[in-house]
Each structure stands twice: as structure tokens, then as C-alpha cells.
Image: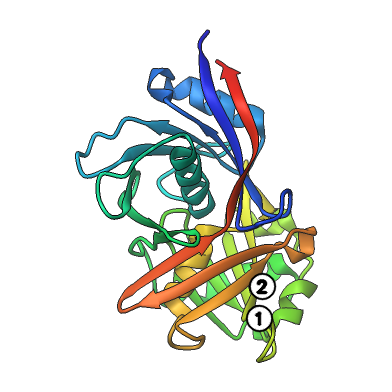
Amino acid sequence: MSAYEFRQVDVFTNEPLLGNPVAVVHGADGLTDEQMAAFARWTNLSETTFLLTPTDPAADYRLRIFTVSGELPFAGHPTLGSAHAWLEAGGKPKGASLVQECGVGLVELRSDDRIAFAAPELRRGGEVDEDTLGAIANGLQIERGDIKDARWCDNGPGWVGVMLADAEAVLAVTPDHAALGSHKVGLVGRYPEGSECAVEVRAYFPADGVAFEDPVTGSLNAALGQWLAGSQLPEAYVASQGTAMRRKGRVHVERVGDQVWVGGDTLTTIHGTVEV
């Protein structure tokens, strides 16, 4: 049994306990896949990450991301939270920006007022077939006509982005989690012009075949930004997420040319060691 430095970081908030937590284990090269998976199940958070020595010389560190049921090639809030933990522990980027190595390859991050990651390229985009939309509407317990627009937003987790009439409609959804099954659904609806946030976002993610709601979701907001920023929404906007769960997530999305950046405030809530 060995001791590893550990941080639990609250992401997409500047107030403790109102964002989305991620568990981060530092210097985890000595852990096996089985130990990582077991620790992720034990934390019972949506994601647990492990900071490792990079295999690509262009990267500052390598990151592995686990849910309670398996490993993800990429996820947004774990990327921001892990970068925060790495920097707070004294990490120094090799270049002008921070570079993370993970399952989708190299992900660039910047850390100005807040940490932001460059949205990875979509693995799948475009229109969603009617059978899938019908199944999603059934799982959300809404009418098919309530879905105003939809796109595949798969940058690793496999999201389907679903636009409803407005933020109020998004907050009113009461899904049948079992009926959603394996669908990974991101809801988005606009707030009135002049509001603090441009949109309300909700995310449903399956675990062991049953969907649950994720408090604040970086990967989904990245893909939604690739779809909406500069077209249906301004090139820079703030998304609210977590309202229905009594959280106060704020996701800062910005399109710069062809690149979408997704950022948020981060803060450490637990710091210590873990023995595995």
C-alpha cells in the first residue's frame, strides 16, 4: 500500500460546494488499471482522475479519467479540475500554454483569469436520426415537438445536444432515467436577452445502464459551443448549469476563429493523501 497526494476540486464555481467536484490523484504512475477503477468506484463521484508522467514530449502531464463504471477518453470538468490541481501542486508548463495528454490526444489549456481548455474535435456531429430523437423525447417525458433542434455532440462521452424552447422548459424537465437508458443527453435552452447567463444546460449520463444528472459538464458545454457559439448564440457567452440540483455552475464559452474555449473557476475543497 502506497500514499499518494490527493485533491478534490470544485469546478465551474468560485464558491465552495456549488460546482462539480472531481477527485484528483497525483503521481499515480504506480497504480494499476484495477486500482484506479476501484478508487473511482469508491469515491462515487461522476469522475476521478489520475495525473501521470506524459508519454508525448509535447505534453506537460498525462491524465486518465474514470467514472464509477469505466474510463473516458475525455471529459471537461475533470480536465479543468486536474489542471488546477497540477498547477496548485507546483506544476510548471513547458510552453506558453498547458498541454494535457489523454485518451483523445493532446488538449491545450490556458490559465488567465480562469483555466480554459480548447474543445477537442468532435468524433461525431451532424443531425440526429428520428428514432434516437423519439427515444430521447420519451425518456425526457416530453413531446417530440418540444425538441426544437438537435445535434450529435460527441467529443468522447457521446453526447446528443437537444435544444428546447427556452431555459424554463429545460428546468421543467423531469426525466424517466430508466427510459433514457444509454443515451447521453445534453439539454440547452435560452434565457431572455439581458439575463446573467445566455442559456441553461442540463446533462444526463448513464451509469450502469441508468441515467443520472451531472451537475456541471465541460465536455457537453464544449460541444454545445461548437454547435451554437457564433451562430445561434454569441461568440462568447456564459452557460448556467446545475440550477435544478441546487448548484450554481457557470461555464464560460468563447469561440476564437475556429477554436472554441471552455473555462470556469476552480477551487480545492479537500487536500491530503490517499493510501491505495
Asked whether, in this view, residue 43 is left or right of residue 103, the answer is right
Residue extending furthest toward the bottom:
193
Question: Whole-percent x and y of residue 44?
Answer: 67, 35
Q: Secondary structure at mark 1?
A: helix
How far is disc 2 from disc 1 in space, using C-alphas? 5 Å
Q: Which residue is mark 2?
A: 137
Quadrant of the drawing holding the C terminus:
top right
Q: Looking at the picture, how far across and down is residue 266, in whole percent?
A: 58, 52
Pointer 2 and pointer 1: residues touching (CB < 8 Å)? yes
Identify the residue at horizontal 71%, vertical 55% (top origin): 15
Give the residue at mark 1.
144
Q: Is residue 230 left or right of residue 166?
A: left
Helix, strand or loop for disc 2: helix
Residue 156 appears anywhere in the view: yes
Name the foreground residue: 13 vs 276: 13
| Residue at horizontal 53 percent and vertical 7 percent from the top | 1
